Amino acid sequence: MKKNIGLTIITLGLLILSAPLNHAAQESQTAEVLLGAALHQEEVEGDFEGAIETYKEILTRFPDNRQLAAEAQFRMGRCYEKLGRTEAKKAYEAVLSKYADQSKFAAMARKRLDAMTVPGPPTMTARMLENPPPDSPGCAVSPDGRFLTFNDGRTGDLVIRDLRTLEDRFLTDEGTEGEEEAAVRQWAEGSVWSPDGREIAYVWNIQSDTAQTELRGVGVDGGRPRIISRHEKSIQEMGSFAWSPDSKHIAATLNSGSLNIVLISTDDGSIRTLVELKQEIFPTNKAFSPDGRHIACDRLPEKTSPERDIYLISIDSGREIPLIQHPADDYLLGWSRDGRWLVFASDRTEALGLWVVGMSGNRIDGEPILVRPGIERILPVGLTNQGSLFYGVVRATEDIFAVDMDPETGKVAGSPRKAIEHYEGGNFTPSYSPDGEHLAYVSRRGNSPYPTNVGNALCIRTWATGEERVFYKEIWRLGLRHIAVSGWSPDGRSVIFRGSPGIYPNGLYRIDLETDEINRIVSLSPDERTPGGIFGPEGRCYFVRANIKDRYTQILCRDLTSSQERELYRQTGAERIGIALSPDGRRLSFANAGWGGTRSLNIIPISGGETREIWNFGETKRGMPPISHIWSPDGRSILFSSPDPEDMRIWNLWRIRIHGGQPEKTGLQTKWGLWDLTMHPNGRGLLFAGRGGPSTDSELWVLENFLPSADKSN
């Protein structure tokens, strides 16, 4: 008995003695876990703000663990420095004042403070150029920063501007973009400067009965252009250029059914494929390394990923290796002439920012540095030899507006107001549900300025509560970039929308709002387009299919159960036909526009039969946008919007009785657009999409003195 008591006392004593040790071990383990989490936030996720908060927690909870606290204090300074914030200096000074005994981190903090106090380059400045060209994202700047090339929107010719004198000169004179009667359309598209600044290469499009694309070159002083390479109509797109430092090759993206990054010889026009890409991943920018051995390029890692990464392509082998991989969207802006800095845009701190990363040959040297936070969506125009970045600003300016209407008189009361106030500048194609309780629309997400990498979300909003269901990843998993709502099913359980992995819609899709299942209900060939489709009674879908190759357009009825199709209407030479279904589901209205001829508003029975024209708009002018129209809830009239033929910035909303007569103005007039009309079932609420103001795509900026000084040490 005494023996057992003795053992118990000894055991208790050991437990008492070990308790502080166990507690200390647990605390150490917790501290290491927190440090690991902070390092992951900083180095993997790029969440510098979140990492700072975690480092602060370590300092608060574990002040006696001096080695750990010193590391947390130093790492916090690095995060501040990457964010470009002045708190970095205070954080490093705190390492020296509080943790001088931690020699490793004290030395690292002193090194960073010394680097920060070394006189740097002149102050970074950003300035907007006066009187920018009409389409600055299509510009290219000369290597010395003196000249700018751009495409003239009136003629289609290539123009050069002296940025000192603001004098413009035409480098080509064959453009026919603005000539209505021209038998052959010709226009320039995109340009790139040779490294010595003596020649500009550009795409020249020739469109008649046959299509042809040429890569041409012209001297800076003008003269007769030379044809570098010629491509027949099999080439759908050529762009995203970079000229090699030795001037012997131009790198380009070539779309001929398959998507390839190629090298085009500037001597004989021969083409060598470097990388074969999937059709849906869309590389956007390219830049040669100064030694000419590699090309940096940004693209989507997979078609289902909305965020781009930056890759390096070997000129010799064509091997493509990841250079910058991050959960954020990263896109390339340029490579400095000395080869030491790669410039890119990234939203890794949520807001889009301008970043640089050091380069040593074909490898990254050090960590990315945020040099300018909070930039807008920008398109690179060029990085000069002096390290100045020219760029165009791209702003999404389409919003959904609401206006009140008297259903009896058809007159509008009051001024339009924004109906959706979040993600402003990127909301469009509104559509009321049949009961008026919900709104389907599309909202632009992401920071990409490129049409092929936009990323759109399908949103279903409940009017009474403002709550929304957002389908974004579901859309991306289908490989779709561009989507647009077409309408609701009669029972309000599903929504039809058109979608595409590229610029042009390749099909119609239906989303079941009870199961969230998405199915493609209409497929299109590469030569076909659709402005949209609508649900009809008895499980039918009515949609428009335009054949671009043979230049005819159909209105079709498709049975969604049997997939059988029936043609209701066909027109030769019409590219865009918008359709709407009458409230009783018995008639279709359509407004046509396209390759010449007249524009009209028409009605046809869904069972087929004679088409009845209720209004003729006269001759179509090139560049005139399509007519948007809807039926009034009582089915007795049609509302339509149309731009003024003399000033297409001015739009009016009209009402016309379905049995004919003169259109009447409703009193709604806007600047910069009035389309995608949708009416509440009570006839009193009208929504439409349009711009809130003039397009600002013509802004052109230059950022100077932004590259870091010679010290790239970390």
Image (tube, rainbow, N blue to C red):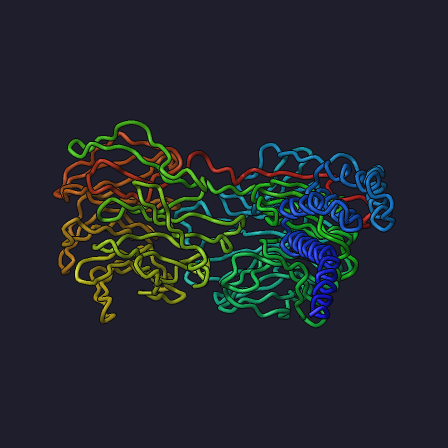
Q: In this view, does 207 lie to the left or right of 354?
A: left
Quarter of the image for residue 570 reads: bottom left
Task: Check the image and name the residue furthest to the front.
Answer: 1
Kindly identify the residue that appears in the image at 67 percent across and 45 percent down. Answer: 57
Residue 587, visible in the rendered structure: yes
Q: Is residue 413 left or right of residue 14?
A: left
Furthest-top residue in this view: 414
Which image quarter is the N terminus in?
Answer: bottom right
x and y percentages locating residue 629 in the rendered image: 26, 44
Up-down relation of residue 492 to residue 408 (above or below): below
Q: Nearer the viewer, residue 205 or 562?
A: 562
Q: Nearer the viewer, residue 522 or 261?
A: 522
- Residue 529 figure quarter: bottom left
In-image side of 449 versus 583 (left or right): right
Please, is residue 89 above or below residue 235 in the view? above
Which of 616/94 is in front? 94
Q: Where is residue 8 in the image (x, y as percent from the top left)?
A: 70, 65
Q: In this view, does 297 lie to the left or right of 605?
A: right
Picture quadrant of residue 294: bottom right
Total residue callouts:
0
Q: Where is residue 325 in the image (x, y as percent from the top left)?
A: 64, 59
Inspect this view and state whether residue 383 appears.
Answer: no
Task: Judge by depth and name the residue closer to the eye, 597 or 257.
Answer: 257
Where is residue 308 drawn, in percent x and y?
Answer: 58, 57
Question: Residue at the spot x=37%, y=51% of the render?
Answer: 469
Q: Is residue 15 above or below residue 104?
A: below
